[in-house]
């Protein structure tokens, strides 16, 4: 876009990039560097960029002393199930809104979309006693159901814009061949919608994986804790000042989302921004 | 639901077709039912109940709801600490959203240019956004550590400051800290939206401007930015809504302190509800919060529906 043939333009372009890159990437570099340093190297006024004495002690501490394995497992269960549940609900609803004509269809979708602006913390005030009355407080199932809150509205909209772009002729042709609507959805539409499903699934997964508020409030026993509150409550305690272990544990807790994201990001960015840039 | 293969007998073909359409559409509605039920149970009902609760006095000591009219709202509007939370929220949202907007746009413009290694830089720049919020909070608490934090070390070395700044333990430092952390975390998302917007910019239009002798700066002002108008609106509203919802990073970094300096509405609701167990008041704070979020969100949703 920019013409970078003049030296001045080049200087401005790459100078800005260097400053921004420092801001974006240095913190992550620092997290890795700190996690590999010994205590003596961490607590100095003017630290060195790279560890002088590499050590894995922080990782061993984080993995053995903390219950990080348990937290990871709990997060995988709740965020994974929450994402599958949300994606399934959103997909059928979005297909219904996009490809059928019945009264109240658009108002229902508008209402669902408006829910994006309901503050999550406020919904929790009523969700808490609601889950309590069903005996779902302090259970993974309760948390999974609550995770629908985060992503259902936007997931429905994302799938809706996906399905709206699929030609209706496809469905009509299959109907003419005598296929039932359920068969059409499962055999024809869903395979075509895999990139969309991946996007929405990952989106819902990330919301749940990154959540602190709901997990902190709805789960009280240590063995059911997910990664967010797990990390927070461990490193808020006596080891508040053990920054090496805190950084090591943070990195371990981030690995699953980073891996999932780096594999699927191509789909993801397209799907996420699809509805927003059409004009 | 299925197309009968039998030859037409009885009702006319058109009427049969209409009946069939109706059956199809009834089936279509059934597909939406599970999501609608889930929506009503976990989103709509809790929201309506929160509105209802805001007119009642309910605490852990008096669990029986007692109608108090607008009393909770009067309390909210006359209590300096709650008004402060409101002001803090507005300030946090406005500052964070505008800083992230500018930096996200700049980064997107840089990433739209082709240069060697762009694909890697582009993917890597999404990293801050995928980290769990607790991790982001830890990371920035450590970077901003008063005694051993690298930011202070850096500023001291450069001679910008003479003494370490106690970032998170002073009111303005803590505010700056959460703004920086949230900005860092959201730049990737803002960038992704802007990049998507830039991709639909027609190269011919740019070329034409170039041929007319436009400089980089002129092309940016007269061609690129006007093209991004719609994207900018989306990013602003989604960004502001996201920042207004923000709880995790702030709570983990400062817990709303020191002395309430970073006590935004999300934290105030949490504290009223789950620390004071004053559910009526928590709901009232929530309703006031919703009224703050509603106007920009409404504008955004209306433009979504128009498309």
Image: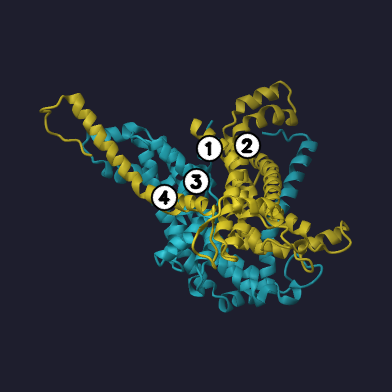
Chain colours: A cyan, B yellow
Q: Marks 1 and 2: which is nearer the front?
A: 1
Q: Residue at x 58, y 79 (%)?
A: A65
> Which one is nearer the viewer's eye here, B264 or A72?
B264
> Which chain is mark 1 on?
B
For label 3, the SS is: helix
Task: Give the Cα separation between the discs numbered 1 and 2.
Answer: 14 Å
Q: Which residue is mark 4?
A: B40
Q: Chain of mark 4?
A: B
Q: Which residue is mark 3?
A: A115
- Element class at badge 4: helix
| Contact? badges 1 and 3 (CB < 8 Å) | no
Which image quarter holds the N terminus of chain B?
A: top left
Give the alpha-carbon distance from disc 1 to disc 3, as whole Å: 11 Å
Same-chain check, marks 1 and 3: no
Residue identifier under label 2: B232
Q: Residues within 10 Å of mark 3 (few under 14, many from 20)?
A: many
Secondary structure at numbered mark 1: helix
């Amino acid at each position: 876009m920019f013409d970078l043939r003049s030296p001045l333009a080049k200087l401005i372009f790459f100078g800005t990039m260097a400053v921004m890159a420092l801001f974006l990437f240095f913190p992550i570099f620092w997290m890795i560097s700190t996690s590999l340093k010994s205590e003596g190297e961490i607590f100095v006024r003017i630290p060195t960029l790279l560890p002088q004495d590499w050590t894995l002690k922080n990782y061993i501490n984080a993995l053995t002393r903390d219950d990080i394995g348990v937290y990871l497992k709990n997060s995988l269960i709740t965020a994974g199930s929450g994402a599958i549940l949300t994606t399934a609900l959103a997909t059928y609803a979005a297909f219904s809104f996009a490809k059928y004509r019945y009264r109240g269809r658009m108002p229902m979708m508008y209402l669902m979309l408006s829910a994006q602006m309901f503050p999550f913390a406020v919904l929790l005030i009523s969700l808490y006693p609601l889950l309590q009355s069903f005996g779902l407080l302090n259970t993974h199932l309760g948390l999974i159901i609550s995770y629908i809150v985060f992503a259902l509205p936007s997931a429905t909209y994302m799938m809706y814009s996906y399905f709206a772009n699929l030609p209706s002729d496809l469905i009509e042709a299959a109907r003419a061949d005598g296929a039932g609507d359920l068969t059409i959805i499962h055999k024809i539409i869903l395979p075509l919608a895999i990139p969309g499903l991946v996007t929405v699934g990952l989106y819902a997964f990330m919301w749940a994986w990154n959540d602190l508020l709901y997990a902190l409030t709805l789960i009280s026993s240590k063995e059911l804790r997910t990664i967010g509150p797990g990390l927070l409550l461990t490193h808020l305690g006596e080891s508040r000042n053990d920054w090496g272990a805190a950084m090591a544990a943070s990195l371990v807790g981030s690995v699953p989302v980073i891996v999932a994201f780096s594999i699927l990001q191509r789909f993801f960015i397209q799907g996420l921004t699809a509805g927003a840039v059409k004009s | 639901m299925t197309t009968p293969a039998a030859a037409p007998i009885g009702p006319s073909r058109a009427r049969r077709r209409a009946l069939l359409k109706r059956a199809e559409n009834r089936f279509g509605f059934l597909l939406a039912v599970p999501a609608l039920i889930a929506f009503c149970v976990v989103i709509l009902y809790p929201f309506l109940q929160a509105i209802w609760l805001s007119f009642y006095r309910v605490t852990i000591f008096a669990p029986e709801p007692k109608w108090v009219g607008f009393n909770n709202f009067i309390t909210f509007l006359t209590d300096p600490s709650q008004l402060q939370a409101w002001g803090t929220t507005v300030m946090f949202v406005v500052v964070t959203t505008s800083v992230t907007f500018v930096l996200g746009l700049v980064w997107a413009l840089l990433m739209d240019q082709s240069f060697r290694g762009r694909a890697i830089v582009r993917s890597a720049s999404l990293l801050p956004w995928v980290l769990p919020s607790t991790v982001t909070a830890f990371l920035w608490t450590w970077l901003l550590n008063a005694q051993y934090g690298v930011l202070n070390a850096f500023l001291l070395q450069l001679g910008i400051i003479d003494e370490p700044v106690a970032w998170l333990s002073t009111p303005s430092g803590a505010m700056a800290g959460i703004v920086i952390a949230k900005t860092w975390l959201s730049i990737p998302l803002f960038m992704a939206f802007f990049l998507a917007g830039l991709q639909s910019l027609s190269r011919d239009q740019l070329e034409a401007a170039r041929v007319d002798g436009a400089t980089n700066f002129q092309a940016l002002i007269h061609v690129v930015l006007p093209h991004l108008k719609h994207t900018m609106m989306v990013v602003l509203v989604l960004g502001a809504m996201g920042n207004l919802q923000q709880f995790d990073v702030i709570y983990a970094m400062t817990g709303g302190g020191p002395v309430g300096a970073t006590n935004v509405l999300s934290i105030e609701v949490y504290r009223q509800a789950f620390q004071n167990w004053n559910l009526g008041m928590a709901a009232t704070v929530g309703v006031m919060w919703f009224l703050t979020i509603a106007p920009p969100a409404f504008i955004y949703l209306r433009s979504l529906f128009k498309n």
